């Protein structure tokens, strides 16, 4: 791995693993931190799905497109383009003075003059100067109530609280509103993250509660958890989307912080214990990490060794993208992957190999312009 990439990854891993304040003490009983509920998703399990994103992941993949999912505690993201500090807004500074440093040039309206009304685009999209700087270490020490008040103080939604406590019933009440779409499409609930298996009791209760309400279930997992957590979720799962990123444990450790042994072992045991469960294995194809036909062939061999189609395994490589880059900046972090790109030709070759393997997921046929649509 290049020296500069290594140092960016290590710096980001340190930042994204900073401890947060006393948030657990203030969490309602039987709740978890949810940072997003996404409706009408077509790519995260069968049919139309509602995705519930739980906060916190043990891995630190530097290409993660949801960096707000990685820390277990709540945090605040800040989008400078929405900030109206240049028009005199100082609501966040009033809410927590030690958390905000204004960077307002002289000649701006005096602080507090504005009857703070949400205004988008005040700061040009490519503005290099942020109107304020957040003091992250101060924010990290706030408890959940204080952090919530701080984020809510912003009238323009430049500040967002990432991670809201929700109980199982609160989540299911939201998910159930999409039932008509589930019924028509064969869809349901997908729990994602972060890592859903890191919330064992909450996840098991959520999946069981969904089944009680007649909603089918899926999870998206990186597979890094005690097998007991996977086994208890699997009792209430209709489908699993399981990431296998690399068969090389040392490379896996270097890039994500952990080796792959537990992940591979968990998936192997799942195939034995639940051969009937549909298992969509996915691999994000990442430049410099696993972007070779040999890397993907090793994963395909592993899946064939576990029974392949006979164990209801399908496989989908996912092309590297940079959709999460802006979110890193909103969290005060540098995007660790820099400017790397994945070659289209290489990804097409990898996709051809997967299509030839007999394990290709349906989505791969739909994605492939060179094949007739099924
Ligand atoms: S409250 Fe929001 S809009 Fe006002 S200065 Fe703070 S971040 Fe900017």
Image: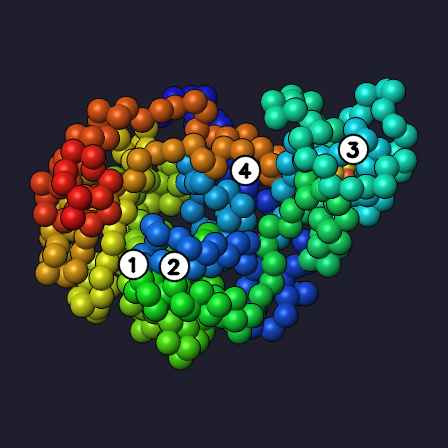
Which is in the foreground here, disc 2 or disc 3? Answer: 2
Q: Which residue is mark 2?
A: 49
Rounded to the nearest angstrom, the CA distance separating label 1 from label 3 is: 45 Å
The quadrant in which residue 64 appears is top left
Ligand 1 within 8 Å, label 3 CB:
yes
State the residue at coordinates (33%, 65%): 184
Colour pattern of the rendering? rainbow
Label 3 neighbourhood size at 10 Å, few (<14), some (14-19), many (20+)? Answer: many
Label 2 neighbourhood size at 10 Å, few (<14), some (14-19), many (20+)? Answer: many
Which percent across, then down, holds residue 332? 62, 35
Q: Which residue is mark 3?
A: 85
State the residue at coordinates (58%, 66%): 166
Q: Which residue is mark 1?
A: 46
CB contact under 8 Å: marks 2 and 1: yes
Q: Which residue is mark 4?
A: 327
Earlier sequence position, callout 4 versus callout 3: 3
Label 1 neighbourhood size at 10 Å, few (<14), some (14-19), many (20+)? Answer: many
Earlier sequence position, callout 1 versus callout 3: 1
CB contact under 8 Å: marks 4 and 3: no
Which percent across, then down, holds residue 232? 35, 71
């Amino acid at each position: 791995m290049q020296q500069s990439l290594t140092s960016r990854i290590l710096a980001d891993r340190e930042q994204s693993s900073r401890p947060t304040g006393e948030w657990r003490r203030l969490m309602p009983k039987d709740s978890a931190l949810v940072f997003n509920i996404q409706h009408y998703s077509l790519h995260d399990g069968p049919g139309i799905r509602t995705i519930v994103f739980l906060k916190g992941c043990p891995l630190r993949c530097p290409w993660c497109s949801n960096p707000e999912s990685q820390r277990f505690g709540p945090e605040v993201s800040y989008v400078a383009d929405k900030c109206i500090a240049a028009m005199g807004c100082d609501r966040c500074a009033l809410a927590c003075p030690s958390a905000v440093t204004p960077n307002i040039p002289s000649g701006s309206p005096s602080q507090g003059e504005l009857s703070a009304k949400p205004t988008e685009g005040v700061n040009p999209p490519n503005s290099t100067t942020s109107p304020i700087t957040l003091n992250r270490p101060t924010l990290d020490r706030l408890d959940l109530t204080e952090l919530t008040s701080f984020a809510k103080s912003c009238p323009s939604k430049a500040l967002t609280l990432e991670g809201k406590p929700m109980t199982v019933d609160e989540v299911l009440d939201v998910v159930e509103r999409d039932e008509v779409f589930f019924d028509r499409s064969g869809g349901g609930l997908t729990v994602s993250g972060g890592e859903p298996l890191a919330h064992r009791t909450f996840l098991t209760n959520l999946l069981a509660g969904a089944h009680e309400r007649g909603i089918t279930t899926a999870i998206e997992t990186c597979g890094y958890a005690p097998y007991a957590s996977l086994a208890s979720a699997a009792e209430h799962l209709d489908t699993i989307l399981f990431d296998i990123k690399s068969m090389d444990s040392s490379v896996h450790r270097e890039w994500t912080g952990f080796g792959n042994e537990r992940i591979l072992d968990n998936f192997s045991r799942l195939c034995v214990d639940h051969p009937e469960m549909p298992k969509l294995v996915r691999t994000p194809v990442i430049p410099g990490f696993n972007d070779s036909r040999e890397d993907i062939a090793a994963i395909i061999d592993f899946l064939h060794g576990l029974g392949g189609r006979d164990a209801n395994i399908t496989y989908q490589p996912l092309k590297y993208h940079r959709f999460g880059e802006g979110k890193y900046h909103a969290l005060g972090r540098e995007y660790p992957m820099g400017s790397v790109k994945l070659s289209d030709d290489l990804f097409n070759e990898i996709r051809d190999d997967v299509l030839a393997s007999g394990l290709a997921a349906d989505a791969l046929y739909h994605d492939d312009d060179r094949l007739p649509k099924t």
